[in-house]
Amino acid sequence: MTHFSEKLTNWYAQNKRDLPWRNTRDPYRIWLSEIILQQTRVDQGTAYYLKFEEAFPTVVDLARADNEKVMKLWQGLGYYSRARNLHTAAKTITDVHKGDFPRSHKQILELKGVGEYTAAAIASFAFGQPYAVVDGNVYRVISRVFGIKTPIDSSQGKKEFNEIAASLLDKKDPGTHNQAIMEFGALYCKPASPDCNSCIFNNVCHAYRNNEVQTLPVKEKKTKIRSRFFNYLVLQKKEQIIIRKRRGNDIWTNLYDFPLIETSSELEEEEFFTSTQWKELSGQLDFKFSKVSPPYKHILSHQHIFAKFWLIEPKGSLKKIAPAASVIVNVSDLTKYAVPRLIERYLQDASLI
Ligand code: ADE
């Protein structure tokens, strides 16, 4: 065992949080927790993990579930491709692997939605195999302690950090070592305000000794943020309302929202009703425009969405104007559908749910 790993795992034994997926070696539960935790904080993720574990105690239960139910349970967690891939992979495990979670690193890596990080986590936590995890926490700890300045989002950086992580790994108990380095990154070596004063590595940490804690790790590219302007058409008549299931490979695939006109800037009322998109969509529609919501801002990792909801009551039947791929539902049934958080906020504000 390396000196680094010994210090780290001793620290972990005394400081680790008691989290539900740490009390199991069931690869299904470990996989589930890792997919949930990929882009989600532990305090938010834990509730979802417990819900999924209860609804689907085995991978076969998850595979056999209706996709609508899986998406509904995932509602609010974001990055919904995780839920779709989780469901697809559960079917692969059930059909191809006969319900037995694969043990080989190669087969684990072939599961939909499982990348290098998740495969290493499952292989080491569930099966004790010597694969080092490299996630955001690990990049941070290694770059700071060892003073590695290669950008973490470059191919050279990935290679270098992977090699260092592998060389530090405790081959006798890789699972505990991997949990420990991530826990250390999450609790001590935090991005903005790490607890350097009480850190177990502060006497050797390159970044601490050279006042580089704030500049490490180095990233090559700045995340580009795109602004998008959504004009949602809330087509409602008495208790009936039109929603539609999102398709394609934009955000929120398989979730429900409303028919949408996307524009390159925010539109005021007059601009909206004279826009070509509205004219094309509404055709000869006879309608009553009730009101427009204030703008809603919804922040995603690479997009800022500015949404307005245009409440429109058609004079004729909803059926005639329902755009392709949309469905007419009763307002009282809206809670049954998985919707993005943005839509949920609007539905709550409009007292529709
Ligand atoms: N983040 C990702 N995986 C984790 C785990 N197993 N425990 C705590 N936080 C995590």
Image: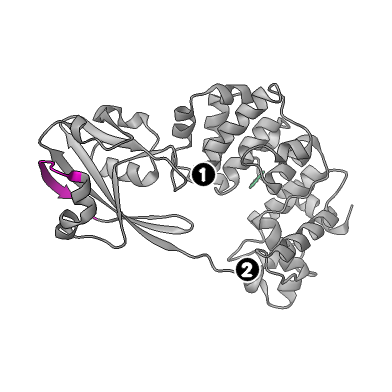
Q: Looking at the picture, tell me which residue is in the foreground, 353 or 207.
A: 353
Identified at 14% across, 59% down, the residue is 270
Residue that label 2 marks: 219
- Which disc number belongs to residue 44? 1
Please provide percent x and percent y for residue 324: 30, 36
The quadrant in which the C terminus is found is top left
Please provide percent x and percent y for residue 216: 66, 70
Name the image quarter holding residue 87: top right
Q: Is residue 135 visible?
A: yes
- The answer to whether residue 333 is above or below residue 106 is above
Kind of residue at disc 1:
Gln
Mark 1 vs mark 2: in front: 2
Q: Looking at the picture, tell me which residue is in the foreground, 127 or 101.
A: 101
Q: Is residue 188 magenta?
A: no
Kind of residue at disc 2:
Lys
Identified at 13% across, 41% down, the residue is 285
The span picked out in magenta is: 282-294
Distance of mark 1 from mark 2, alpha carbons? 27 Å
- On screen, residue 52 versus residue 16, left or right, reads left
- The answer to whether residue 129 is above or below residue 87 is below
Extreme-bottom residue of the structure? 210
Q: Residues within 10 Å of mark 1 (few under 14, many from 20)?
A: few
- On screen, residue 279 versus residue 156, left or right, reads left
Name the image quarter holding residue 242: top left
Q: Secondary structure at mark 2?
A: loop
Q: Is residue 353 visible?
A: no
Please provide percent x and percent y for residue 241: 23, 33
Identified at 21% across, 39% down, the residue is 235
